[in-house]
Amino acid sequence: MHDPYLLCLKCGEHIPFARMLNSCPQCGHDMLDVRYDYAAIAQELPTQWAQRSFGMWRYRELLPLRNPANIVSMGEGGTPLVQSVNMGTMLGHDHIFIKDERQGPTGSFKDRQAALAISAMKEAGVMEAVVASTGNVAISYSAYCARAGIKLWGFLTSLVPADKMREVALYGTEVVKITGTYDQCKEVAASFAQHRGLFLDKGLRSIAARQSMKTLAFEVCEQLGLLRDGYGKWRAPDWYIQAVSGGMGPIGAWRGFEELYEMGLIDRLPKIAVIQAEGCAPMVSAFKAGKDMPDIVIAPNTHIETLATGNPGVAYGLLRQIILQHGGSMESVSDQESFRAMHVLAKMDGISVESATGTAFAGLFKLIAQQIIKRDEIVVVNCSGHTFPVEKELLGDEWARDVEVPGPTPTASVPQEGLLSAIERLDDRMRDILIMDDTPEASRLLRRILQAYGTFNVREAENGRIGLEMVHQRPPDLILLDLMMPEMDGFEVLDALKSDKELGKIPVIVVTAKELTAIEKQRLSDKIQSLMQKGAFSDQDIVDKMMEMLN
């Protein structure tokens, strides 16, 4: 097997990989990468990988560390690839997979970067280092530097939540808070490192940091192969989606997909979707305008501080080239769309994520709605980190209901009727919804959507006959009706309801997968309040429509 070598991404110079370099000795360019003996690795190593524990160091022959004794590890990588169930059903898309990077040692995908970058520092003999961060990198680097015995200076913008700053400090990092943008923060950190003669982590320009992200692609393709094709098979997704700030994640992951393709382990390359916050979208703005250079954002306007890089530098050109050559998209979403996507993912699939991941999923929703992502394509979304503690922008002030219970007296316990009346008042605020649908998955999804909003009492009927009996027993405030049911279909239910003067007043929303003919639409026209196609509405769509009917 041939030794790996450094490659200058500008002039193509091949440089022996004896140590990490900051720039090309031939042309001075500061973007270098590592190349390996892919033919030999493909022939010899996949079988060995399968026998190792599932984590990022499983693929150590494709990582730029000379001596495994220098590995600084806390069990990073090997995160689950989870198929979305309820949210996928809601979107009408059965092939959405979530790479759950919340499971890393410090709760974000930056643990991969920290593990390899700090290991490389250890190998190079670095004892003191400087990093600029919007939060997650500083937390990860602080943890791994503590483990490696390296003193770290963390430069963070004042927009970083205090909880994250405290966690950084907890590891013993010297925290320097910069009142300014992230780009200004990076400039101050670089000046400090130069003045003190300290090692500066260069983010995207760091070979180790960038190469670490390849392991995302390696794991995804191995996991997808196992899930879809069985043991020993590798499979690339059709789409890889990630929210970006500086762009390192998808750039590094893309190189991983390329290497697997070069080794013949996957038969195609995925399309990349880059999602940015609307208030700081220098890549998306430039891409849609057909520009070669990013539209630099001087003053980012977003609550999602981890995505507030106004000048992505060379990252934009690299991602633009990948997308133009191999397909993909760049899209921006508002903060509110991101926060709403966080709600949807938590309420539908039980996954609580950071706001940057919410941005990625909001982008997914938009690309599916625009039919850029097709319903039969396999999609992997990087769930880049956890939201803990919950950001205040997410829930606002009305995230709980107050129930007043009469206070205790010296001589008596709480009166039972007082407690019951408090519970009854809580019940009175809830509206009664009846779901008539013979498909358990569809009925469960509708129930989950309604329960997630917390203001509905939900009953279910598995066919029209049972549903009509339940209506007679206790008329609901609103009916969600499927049309194609056994024994008595939705059309017959509507006819029966409208034949009764009182029951005919109950608002009905038809939720169906059936493609209706003109005659069928005519039959529904004067009997229902709304028609919604399964797989073509969001949770908010149906709740908004219901509240409109109920009010």
Image (spheres, rainbow, N blue to C red):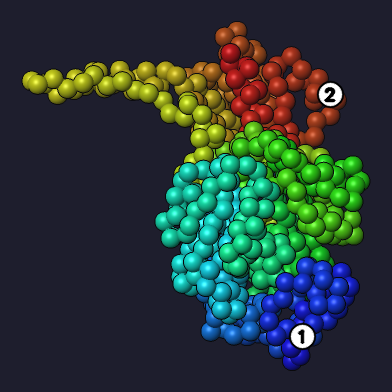
Does 442 sit above or below residue 81? above
Given residues 227 and 391, the one toward you in this image is 391
| Residue drawn at the location 80% of the way across and 23% of the way down | 521
In the image: residue 66, left or right of residue 4: left
Q: Using the image, determine if residue 416 lies above or below residue 260.
A: above
Place residue 51 in its image quadrant: bottom right
| Quarter occupied by the C terminus | top right
> Is residue 358 positioned above or below 3 on the image?
above
For discs 2 and 1, the disc positioned in front in the rendered view: 1
Mark 2 or mark 1: whose residue is earlier in sequence: 1
- Measuring from the top left, give residue 266's x and y in whole percent: 78, 72
Residue type beneath disc 2: Ile
Q: Position of residue 126 (x, y in %)?
A: 56, 74
Q: Secondary structure at mark 1?
A: strand
Residue at the image position 83 percent from the left and 48 percent from the top: 294
494 lies left or right of 40: left
Q: Residue at x 70, y 88 (%)?
A: 44
Image coords of residue 465 (percent x, y): 58, 29
Q: Would residue 71 be visible to someone looking at this image?
A: yes
The residue at the point 80 percent across, 57 percent down is 314
Q: Read off the residue under disc 1.
A: 16
**Dot 1, how many residues are within 10 Å of its Cα: few (below 14), some (14-19), or many (20+)?**
few
> Residue pushed farthest left?
411
Pointer 2 residue: 519
- Which residue type does callout 1 highlight? Pro
Q: CA distance from mark 2 to mark 1?
A: 74 Å
Please, what secondary structure does the residue beneath circle 2 have? helix
- Is residue 257 in view from this perspective? no
Q: Quadrant of the N terminus?
A: bottom right
Of residues 424 and 399, which is closer to you in this image? 399
Crowding at dot 2, Cα within 10 Å, few <14 / some 14-19 / many 20+, comes out as: few
